């Protein structure tokens, strides 16, 4: 079983994204982790490069800023990272630069990956989550709107991100 993590990021330092925490929160589950780093003005590339892991592979990208409306640029950047994952990947784990997985859930996630890796009826895993908004005044609890953070897919299958990098088709 092979697990590939992937994400995209641009100007993480300027906008104070906890991308290092996002990546390292799932890195123990991953055999590789692809980060599409956009043309940043703040040292984001060096920040990602400073994460002490040989699992991380960086893909430099150029954002098309004309596609910001509706978040289309986010979908395209997600696709760029996804296209770099190993072709023999069993599970693809997508995490955004402002998300983290608490370490207490890693063993439970690992068990689910193993349990369902050969189950054709399982295409992904859904997680309950907490969403903090308005400077942590509001907390929303629910099941993530993504198809899953984990996608069990043959990497050779065409997969396209739709919307603002929240769903795959």
Image: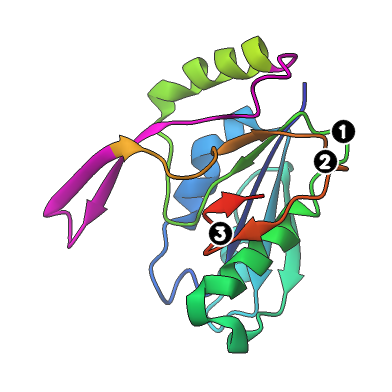
Q: Nearer the viewer, mark 2 or mark 1?
A: 2
**Magenta stretch holds residue 120:** yes
Q: Are marks 2 and 1 in contact (CB under 8 Å)?
A: yes
- Please give left or right for residue 66 compared with residue 157 in the image: left
Q: Are marks 3 and 1 in contact (CB under 8 Å)?
A: no
Q: Which quadrant of the figure has residue 157?
A: top right
Which residues are the magenta region? Answer: 117-141
Q: Which residue is mark 1?
A: 88
Quadrant in which the N terminus appears = top right
Relative image position of residue 114 (x, y in whole percent): 66, 13
Identify the residue at image location x=57%, y=16%.
112
Relative image position of residue 83 (x, y in whole percent): 80, 54
- Vertical side of 88 occupied by 80: above or below: below
**Magenta stretch holds residue 99:** no
Judging depth in this view, the residue of 77 and 124 nearest the camera is 124
Relative image position of residue 26 (x, y in whole percent): 54, 36
The residue carrying pointer 3 sits among few (fewer than 14), some (14 to 19) or many (20 or more) residues within 10 Å by Cα, namely many
Task: Tell me the element at label 3.
Answer: loop
Identify the residue at image location x=88%, y=43%.
156
Task: Tell me the element at label 1.
Answer: loop
Could you give the CA–CA distance between mark 2 and mark 3, rounded to whole angstroms?
A: 18 Å
Could you give the CA–CA distance between mark 2 and mark 1, rounded to whole angstroms?
A: 7 Å
The residue carrying pointer 2 sits among few (fewer than 14), some (14 to 19) or many (20 or more) residues within 10 Å by Cα, namely some
Could you give the CA–CA distance between mark 3 and mark 1, rounded to whole angstroms?
A: 23 Å
Q: Earlier in the sequence, mark 3 or mark 1?
A: 1
- Please give left or right for residue 127 compared with residue 72 in the image: left
Q: Which residue is mark 3?
A: 165
Q: Which residue is mark 2?
A: 155
């Amino acid at each position: 079983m092979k697990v590939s993590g992937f994400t995209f990021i641009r100007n993480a330092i300027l906008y104070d994204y906890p991308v290092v925490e996002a990546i390292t929160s799932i890195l123990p589950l991953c055999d590789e982790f692809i980060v599409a780093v956009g043309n940043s003005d703040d040292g984001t590339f060096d920040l990602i490069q400073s994460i002490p892991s040989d699992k991380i592979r960086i893909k430099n990208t150029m954002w098309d800023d004309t596609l910001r409306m509706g978040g289309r640029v986010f979908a395209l950047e997600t696709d760029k990272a996804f296209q770099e994952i190993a072709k023999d990947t069993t599970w693809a784990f997508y995490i955004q630069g402002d998300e983290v997985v608490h370490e207490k859930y890693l063993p439970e996630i690992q068990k689910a990956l193993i349990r369902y890796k050969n189950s054709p009826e399982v295409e992904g895993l859904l997680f309950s989550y907490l969403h903090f908004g308005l400077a942590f005044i509001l907390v929303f609890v629910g099941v993530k709107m993504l198809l899953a953070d984990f996608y069990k897919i043959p990497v050779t299958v065409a997969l396209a991100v739709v919307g603002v990098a929240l769903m795959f088709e």
